[in-house]
Amino acid sequence: MKRIHVAAAVIRGADGRILIAKRAEEQHQGGLWEFPGGKVEADETVPQALARELEEELGIRPSAARPLIQVRHDYPDKQVLLDVWEVSAFSGEPHGAEGQPLAWVSPRQLDDYAFPAANAPIVMAARLPERYLITPQDLPPAELLHGVRRALASGIRLIQLRAPGMFDAQYRDLAVDIQGLCAGKAQLMLKGPLEWLGDFPAAGWHLTAAQLRQYVDKGRPFPLERRLAASCHSAAELQLAARMGVDFVTLSPVQATPSHPATPALGWAQVAELLQGFNQPAYVLGGVGPAQLEQAWQVGAQGVAGIRAFWPD
């Protein structure tokens, strides 16, 4: 069965809301909501197909677009490759040119709409930011709290509290304080024993590669409403993350770093190859920062994760 190449768009308005459209009942997966787009013809690039489809379906022309995520999905009757781009600027006024209902919704509201199964990773990618801050280790709690406040003020919306050198009780106390700071502003991801999960219901969990191997056969440890991430360094670990049903991963190290000088760097070419078959959002980590965002998008990543790159001085 030939895989159908589809170009789709996460169209984001100036207010951050996202445009979605409802599929006609007689279509494949009819009656469900979708991100606008359509089939890439043999003589087209993805940007060309996207521009044509958005003009035909919505009467708009994209003027700023970049890769967001690629998703391969096998339905019983159809195999698709969804090549999804984020459109952040366009000309024209969107309307259902083919009679389809449209809705502008906040990223959080996307969960309230029924999408085809293949769209689940796209919904997650649309909700996740492009920057993932990991807190530095060996800082006193007061300094960590101060840094998190400043990071939130700068617009950081995804934070991992990583403090491997702390005593468990100290980490847990700090997690309570930082969870309070993040409420309504950012998603907090914690690290630690899964026995702690019940004590921090508002936080997501970032698994180590060792935890991923240990718990993969038990499946996802909590419902889809909570964020689950994992640290990956190889194709095998990405496969484990997919099996467990994580929402996103970090893939590292892209380049050699002072914190892990003995760990071989993957390099951009290998990162691109590893992400080619991975259907979930992935942040690249290790020797990268805001200057590498464009490169990260081009190899298929959600964005960049970092410690030094995003931590306020």
Image (tube, rainbow, N blue to C red):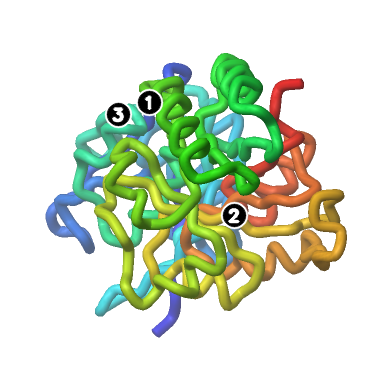
- Residue that mark 3 sits on: 105
Which structural element holds mark 1?
loop
Q: Amino acid type of disc 3?
A: Val
Q: Amino acid type of disc 1?
A: Arg
Report the residue at 57% width, 47% height from top.
302
Q: Position of residue 254 (x, y in %)?
A: 76, 57
Q: Nearer the viewer's eye, disc 3 or disc 2?
A: 2
Q: Position of residue 112 (x, y in %)?
A: 20, 39
Q: Nearer the viewer's eye, disc 1 or disc 2?
A: 2
How far is mark 3 from mark 1, CA to CA?
A: 5 Å
Question: Marks 3 and 1: CB-CB under 8 Å?
Answer: yes
Mark 2 nearby-residue class (10 Å; few <14, some 14–19, many ≥20): many
Residue 151, visible in the rendered structure: no
Assign the N terminus to one quadrant of the image: bottom left
- Residue that mark 2 sits on: 250
Q: Earlier in the sequence, mark 3 or mark 1?
A: 1
Mark 1 nearby-residue class (10 Å; few <14, some 14–19, many ≥20): some
